[in-house]
């Protein structure tokens, strides 16, 4: 659409690094996110996702690296960034002793939102919170808290939404509604960077990045990430899968053996070795088939590899 | 671009007001503490004790002795519980703590009095607690001047002495300060405000940090000074409620004279409350959690009550303690309030005590704003 592709990058950072003491929590991460994109940010616990997001929104200063977020320098223009970014923290961080309406009103005042009353009303309506507007935020269930947090970080019409595990502990229906909302916002041109541990959510993102131990291991669309991982996966069904799994584990080429109901998923990066390992335990009672590797298999494989490389 | 803006400041103020309204326990404490302290210091802790048990050892039975003993009895300070002839028994009574005083009237009391020889009455005091015996001894001194004058009539009138016809010799081992409610109740204002104001704001920022709301606050464009000032303003109102409660009690319950200008009291209280709140906020930017914040507040509170001249006379303290005391806002506030209420001090009289308060406020606020981290680094 735009003639200059760089102008359409809402996040454009390179070499972003953060150390706590002598521990490097985020290690030289490059990331580009385009306008209107839903960008999934994945990684195991403690991999540095929250830390990275905090550097994007001006809460932490990077130890190294540079770049822009909504066109503002992440090192020097933190105040400007804070005004135009909506950040939903991992832990609920609105006031539990204020009602929903009071919380929204507070945020409106902080951002100096024009026509405050109308903004609060619109926000309540859109998220279906009108009837609960006088309830204390602390008394809300997890799902409602998450809705409130989303409403609050949208109220000042930010240009970028940073969502840190917004759906942790939320039921499937609420999660789906939440994602529909996110897609609606993205369709209107809002850019969203979202972290999650759920694979189905990762699949709903336009593009993904995967980090482990502070290192960016993969990024691209879902298919690209899976293809680049170079993982081969086989499924097998039949009797005594437990015995079979035990026999497979530890063989060269076999990296993951995961039970899914009454099938096993066996994967490895070295297709030839994996094939050899499977041939060694092949039994006519079992039904083997080559399968498309899932995102989860890919991530677990990358995590294991990262453990060897970076720890 | 990074200026102070009213709308953000006001957002914080309103939020704090709502939170204060919801936190009934804390709000109750804010009102309860001054009331409790007033009761404790005003009624329960009596630094001017009366009706102290006293033994009399009268070696003389003349009319003047009787008249003198009667006068002691009528003064509120002494309660005559024992008469004895034996010096040993008197000593034992004092030793056991059954009496606070033994009053020894010499054998030739009446005779020497008539001769104009100014006889000596020996009062032995159990002065382990000087505060307990001091006022009574002071009363005895003044009694001396007046009591016997009634009996010295006619030709004896010449004995009505300007210096008092009787000499008292007092063996007290301390020289206690005579604290009265007039002094204590106005002083309480500074103590109560220090105690509550510092604690309440010491919690203000650590609470945000512990509840996780700090991360959100930092992610918004709100500035440190807006947060500080916004958190201070609502508690100034609370401080004013406390000041009003104490002034009302001083007037209605304790009959403390109020010669000075009350408006001036409220104006100075504003500076003092803000100074304490700023101190609390500074603590809360230093503390890691609420417990630490309360401990810091306590460390501040102790010298404020002990070295400010509230508990002990300021001039009686060693020089180093006076220096510490001079750095504490309560020391200056105490002098100002006592000055205004009891002596009717005006603006020019209190200036020497006012500028240290303003300086303290400025320093505490600056340190607080500097220490308030804008990022999570
Ligand atoms: N302020 C800090 N001081 C020291 N270490 C920190 C600090 N903040 C985070 N860490 C460490 O940095 C690492 C990365 O933390 P971070 O919260 O960014 O991970 P995460 O990917 O968000 O994890 P999760 O999925 O569990 O939320 C962790 O090991 C954490 O202990
Ligand atoms: Mg996290």
Image (spheres, grey):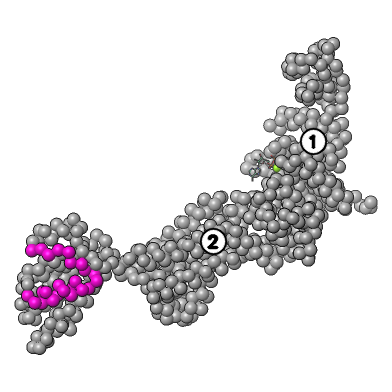
Q: Which SS class for mark 1?
A: helix
Residue in front for this viewpoint, A180 or B111: A180
The range drawn in magenta is B62-85
Q: Which mark is residue A199?
A: 1
How far across and down, in percent of the image, does residue A204 sit?
A: 84, 40
Image marks 2 and 1: residues in contact by CB distance under 8 Å: no
The answer to if B142 sits in the magenta stretch is no
* Camera-side mark, 2 or 1: 2
Identify the residue shown where x is 69% and y is 46%: A141
Image-based side of A129 in relation to B128, left or right = right
User: Residue A135: in sight, yes or no?
Assistant: yes
Residue at (70%, 45%) from the top-left corner? A142
Chain of the residue under the numbered disc 2 shown in the image: B
Query: Which corner quadrant of the figure contains ligand 2?
Result: top right
Residue B177 position, x and y percent, is 30, 68
Q: Residue at x 18, y 69 (%)?
A: B170
| Residue B54 spot, x, y in % from top left | 18, 65
Give the quadrant of residue B125: bottom left
On whether disc 2 and disc 1 are found on a single subunit, the reply is no
- Quadrant where the image shows the N terminus of chain B: bottom right
The answer to whether residue B328 of the structure is visible from this angle is no
Which residue corresponds to mark 2?
B27
């Amino acid at each position: 659409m735009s003639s200059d592709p760089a102008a359409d990058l809402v996040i454009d950072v390179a070499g972003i690094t953060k150390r706590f003491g002598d521990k490097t929590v985020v290690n030289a991460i490059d990331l580009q996110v385009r306008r209107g994109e839903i960008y999934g940010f994945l990684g195991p616990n403690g991999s540095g996702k929250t830390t990275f997001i905090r550097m994007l929104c001006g809460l932490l200063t990077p130890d190294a690296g540079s770049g822009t977020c909504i066109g503002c320098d992440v090192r020097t223009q933190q105040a400007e960034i804070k005004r135009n970014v909506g950040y939903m923290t991992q832990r609920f961080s609105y006031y539990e002793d204020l009602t929903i309406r009071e919380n929204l009103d507070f945020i409106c005042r902080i951002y100096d939102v024009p026509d405050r009353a109308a903004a609060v009303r619109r926000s309540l309506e859109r998220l279906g919170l009108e009837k609960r507007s006088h309830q204390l935020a602390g008394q809300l269930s997890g799902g409602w808290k998450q809705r409130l947090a989303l409403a609050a970080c949208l109220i000042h019409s930010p240009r970028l939404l940073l969502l840190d595990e917004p759906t942790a502990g939320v039921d499937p229906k609420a999660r789906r509604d939440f994602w529909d909302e996110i897609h609606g916002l993205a369709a209107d041109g809002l850019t969203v960077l979202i972290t999650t541990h759920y694979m189905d959510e990762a699949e709903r993102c336009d593009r993904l990045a995967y980090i482990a131990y502070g290192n960016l291991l993969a990024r691209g669309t879902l298919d690209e990430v899976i293809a680049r991982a170079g993982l081969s996966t086989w499924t097998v069904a039949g009797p005594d899968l437990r015995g079979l799994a035990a026999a497979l584990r530890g063989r060269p080429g076999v990296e993951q053996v995961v039970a899914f109901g009454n099938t096993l998923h066996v994967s490895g990066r070295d297709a030839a070795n994996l094939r050899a390992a499977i041939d060694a335990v092949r039994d006519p009672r079992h039904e083997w088939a080559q399968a498309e590797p899932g995102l989860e298999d890919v991530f677990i494989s990358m995590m294991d590899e990262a453990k060897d490389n970076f720890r | 671009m990074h200026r102070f803006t009213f709308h953000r400041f006001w957002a914080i103020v309103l939020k704090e007001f709502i939170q204060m309204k919801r936190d009934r326990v804390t709000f109750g404490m804010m009102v309860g503490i001054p009331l409790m302290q007033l009761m404790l210091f005003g009624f329960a802790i009596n630094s001017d004790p009366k009706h102290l048990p006293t033994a009399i050892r009268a070696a003389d039975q003349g009319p003047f002795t009787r008249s003198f003993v009667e006068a002691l009895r009528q003064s509120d300070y002494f309660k005559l519980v024992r008469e004895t002839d034996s010096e040993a028994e008197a000593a034992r009574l004092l030793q056991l703590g059954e009496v606070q005083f033994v009053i020894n009237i010499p054998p030739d009391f009446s005779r020497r009095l008539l001769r104009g020889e100014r006889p000596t009455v020996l009062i032995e005091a159990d002065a382990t607690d000087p505060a307990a015996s001091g006022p009574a001894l002071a009363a005895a001194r003044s009694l001396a001047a007046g009591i016997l004058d009634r009996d010295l009539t006619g030709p004896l009138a010449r004995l009505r002495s300007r210096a008092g016809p009787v000499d008292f010799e007092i063996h007290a081992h301390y020289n206690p300060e005579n604290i009265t409610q007039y002094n204590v109740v106005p002083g309480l204002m500074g103590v109560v405000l220090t105690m509550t104001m510092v604690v309440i704001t010491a919690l203000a920022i650590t609470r945000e940090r512990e509840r996780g709301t700090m991360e959100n606050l930092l992610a918004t464009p709100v500035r440190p000074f807006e947060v500080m000032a916004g958190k201070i303003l609502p508690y100034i109102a609370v401080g004013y409620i406390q000041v009003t409660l104490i002034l009302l009690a001083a007037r209605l319950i304790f009959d403390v004279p109020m010669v000075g200008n009350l408006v001036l009291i409220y104006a100075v209280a504003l500076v003092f409350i803000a100074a304490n709140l700023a101190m609390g906020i500074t603590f809360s930017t230093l503390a890691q959690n609420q417990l630490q914040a309360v401990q810091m507040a306590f460390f501040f509170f102790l010298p404020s009550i002990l070295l400010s001249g509230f508990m002990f006379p300021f001039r009686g303290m060693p020089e180093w303690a006076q220096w510490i005391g001079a750095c504490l806002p309560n020391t200056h506030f105490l002098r100002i309030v006592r000055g205004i209420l009891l002596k009717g001090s005006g603006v020019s009289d209190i200036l020497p005590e006012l500028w240290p308060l303003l300086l303290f406020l400025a320093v505490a606020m600056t340190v607080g704003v500097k220490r308030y981290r804008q990022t999570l680094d």
